[in-house]
Image (spheres, rainbow, N blue to C red):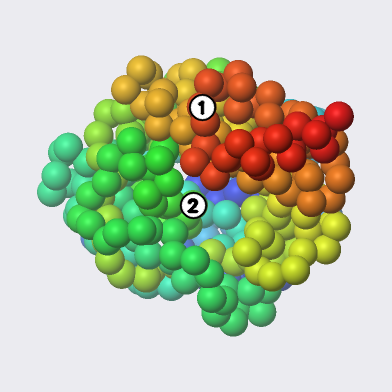
Amino acid sequence: MTTPKVSVSITAFNHAPFIRIALDGVLAQQTDFPVEILVGDDDSTDGTREIVREYAARFPDRITAFFHDASSKSRIKGRLTGRNNLAHNLNAARGEYIALLDGDDCWTDETKLARQVAQLEGDPTLMTSFHHARIIDESGAPLERTPTIKKIKDRYTLEEMISGEYEAQTCTVLFRRGAIHPLPRWFFEAPVGDFVIHTLNGQRGDFGFIDRPMGSYRMHSGGIWSQGNAAGSGQLSSEQIRRTISRYEMMVDLLDAVAKHSGTPHRKAALKRLGMFACMAAKLGAQCHDKAAIRRNMAAIWTARVWPRKLDWRTLTRLLIQAV
């Protein structure tokens, strides 16, 4: 059996409207090295499994499919996740490099893998390669969103990622396999698995950037991050506020884990950003008269010993009064 240069990990859950597009984008890659495609289906019930089986039967030498049942799911902070699905793909990967793709996203450039492998092979100080991604809606139409990179550069550090200077969308990432084996325990406990992977890689090397849109990240009602991404979009409904608070609190939990596991040099940056998300969550809690949310997030700020810039004395006093 030929050893692949790249393993592509596709994780899917109820992605029937999108999974063909995802698979076609991977199969279209033009490379001079072997690529294996690992598809993990996490107990889909909408026809995703049947589509994956169809593709695996058509391309048996390229696609390996794994079908998990409900018992494989795990809860993290009370939320049901597909973390074990991703872990299974990562552990099964044989390639020197691993590329990530969610089943509802897609690649749009046939040279993506070739460009990213060339970048990493040309610079051994880089652990990860990522690129621009377009944000699209359920139908594939482009969406206007705040840029995920504040300043375009050729390379970035882990410190800059933790600080929020840039965000590497899942569909854009390719990394060296070595840093994630074996997967540490906190990968299975942190709210966002991708961020743990980036942290592990970032502790060994920098992130190379390719200033070229080569994939699309899809926002839709079934997406984990899409559901809580309404902040800044105008007047929010009570349901949008609730979801946004949940999203911010997920980031608080994530950054708390990063602060504990990323090492002393990055702890300060993680706690500073944690304070920012906790402050925003507390303010939204006040907006919807959610005393519990105010208390949780004020406690997070106190425990982290950080003082967000946006939390002046007047705001602090108002939040404390509303929390009672």
Kindly tell me whether residue 247 is visible in this rendering. Answer: yes
The quadrant in which residue 310 appears is top right
Quadrant in the picture for the C terminus: top right
Q: Mark 2 sits on what residue? A: 170
Quadrant in the picture for the N terminus: top left
Q: Nearer the viewer, residue 107 or 139?
A: 139
Q: Nearer the viewer, residue 115 or 6?
A: 115
Q: Amino acid at mark 2?
A: Thr
Which percent across, then down, holds residue 301?
60, 27
Which percent across, then down, holds residue 195?
49, 38
Which percent across, then down, holds residue 58?
57, 64
Q: Mark 1 sits on what residue? A: 306
Q: In terms of sequence position, does the residue under pointer 1 or pointer 2 come before the other? A: 2
Q: Amino acid at mark 1?
A: Val
Residue located 27% across and 46% down the image: 156
Asked whether, in this view, residue 18 is left or right of residue 87, the answer is right
